[in-house]
Image (cartoon, helix red, strand yellow):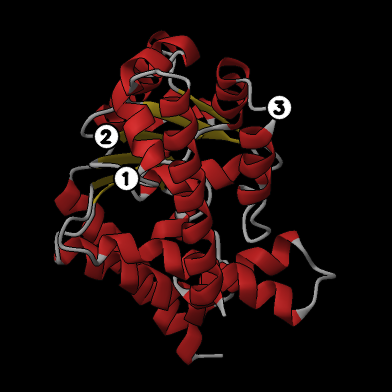
């Protein structure tokens, strides 16, 4: 069901792109000329038309203004980004991470979604939504597992993660689920699919006060920064803001343990949970 939904959404984005190309050409504009008018590059317009990249809502609104399409692209964009598997503020991030060449993430309290096991993701979903149906929970878990497929692709992005030590010792889902979760992280580290550094409690006050942070780089587009709290998220590509976010992330990495020491700590915590699970 999820795959069919994804396929139909992709087909709809392809229709969006084909219509954009047709109406742009009818207006006598090149990709670069339209890009200038809506404040993106001509390459972006080309990616929109090929359904490689999805425009943010404000870009769709500006396209309508320039092409005089009476809100057509805004309406389509609103409909297509309304994917109930993800919060409104996170849907665009999911689209972008599939295009990223490098992702750098800081997780202050929970293991990041791209690294979560199904049991861990289920426990996180239930903790935030204690009165929902099993169907709702499984839909969220399935969506999270689908996102993680980008780490299995040959063309997967470089993925750097700084985990605060909190993430190792908050027992999400119980001892057995935590042992499996940390084993999964350790396995990905050993397979060199992710580079993880643990920020220890001993680091004290640091840039982590900013909360959850993600940076994404792209082959032919400007980098973006994404920050998230419990109930909202902000995605920005303003160069000055992204530069500040990158500096904060660099400070976090500088205060973190080495990858080797981090792996040893992750595996030690997993073993502690395993022993705890075996005695209960």
Query: Which tag, 2 or 3, sits closer to the chain's start?
Result: 3
Q: Secondary structure at mark 2?
A: loop
Residue of label 2: 218
Quadrant for the C terminus, please. Answer: bottom right
Distance from label 2 to label 1 (Cα)? 7 Å
Q: Which residue is at the front of the view, 272 or 91?
A: 91
Q: Which residue is at the front of the view, 33 or 82?
A: 33
Residue of label 1: 99
Q: Are marks 3 and 1 in contact (CB under 8 Å)?
A: no
**Rendered position, 267 above or below 248:** below
Quadrant for the N terminus, please. Answer: bottom right
Distance from label 2 to label 3 (Cα)? 32 Å
Whether residue 200 is visible here, answered yes or no, is no
Asked whether, in this view, residue 19 is left or right of residue 187, the answer is right
Write down the quadrant of residue 249 in the picture.
top left
Residue 137 image position (x, y, % from top left):
68, 73
Residue at (61, 41) in percent of width and height: 77
Q: Secondary structure at mark 1?
A: loop
Give the number of the mark in front: 3 or 1: 3
Query: Which tag, 2 or 1, sits closer to the chain's start?
Result: 1
Distance from label 3 to label 1 (Cα)? 30 Å
Residue of label 3: 70
Residue at (33, 71) in percent of width and height: 184
Q: Secondary structure at mark 3?
A: loop
Q: Residues within 10 Å of mark 3 (few under 14, many from 20)?
A: few
Asked whether, in this view, residue 23 is left or right of residue 90, the answer is left
Residue at (27, 61) in percent of width and height: 151
């Amino acid at each position: 069901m999820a795959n069919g939904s994804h396929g139909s959404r992709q087909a709809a984005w392809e229709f969006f792109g084909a219509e954009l190309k047709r109406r742009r050409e009818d207006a006598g504009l090149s990709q670069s000329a339209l890009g200038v008018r809506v404040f993106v590059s001509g390459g972006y317009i080309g990616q929109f038309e090929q359904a490689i990249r999805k425009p943010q809502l404000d870009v769709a609104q500006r396209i309508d203004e320039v092409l005089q399409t009476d809100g057509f692209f805004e309406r389509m964009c609103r409909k297509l980004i309304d994917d109930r598997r993800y919060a409104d503020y996170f849907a665009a991030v999911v689209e972008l991470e599939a295009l990223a060449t490098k992702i750098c993430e800081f997780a202050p309290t929970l293991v990041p979604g791209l690294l979560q096991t199904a049991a861990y993701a289920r426990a996180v979903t239930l903790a935030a939504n204690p009165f929902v149906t099993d169907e709702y929970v499984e839909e969220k878990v399935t969506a999270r597992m689908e996102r993680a497929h980008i780490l299995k692709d040959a063309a997967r992005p470089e993925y750097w993660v700084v985990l605060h030590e909190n993430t190792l010792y908050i027992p999400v889902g119980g001892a057995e689920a935590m042992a499996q979760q940390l084993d999964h992280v350790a396995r990905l580290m050993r397979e060199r699919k992710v580079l993880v550094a643990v920020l220890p409690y001993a680091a004290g006050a640091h840039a982590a006060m900013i909360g959850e942070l993600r940076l994404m780089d792209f082959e032919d587009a400007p980098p973006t920064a994404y920050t998230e709290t419990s109930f909202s998220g902000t995605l920005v590509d303003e160069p000055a803001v992204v530069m500040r976010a990158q500096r904060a992330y660099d400070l976090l990495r500088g205060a973190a343990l080495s990858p080797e020491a981090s792996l040893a700590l992750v595996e030690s915590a997993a073993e502690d949970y395993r022993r705890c699970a075996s005695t209960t």
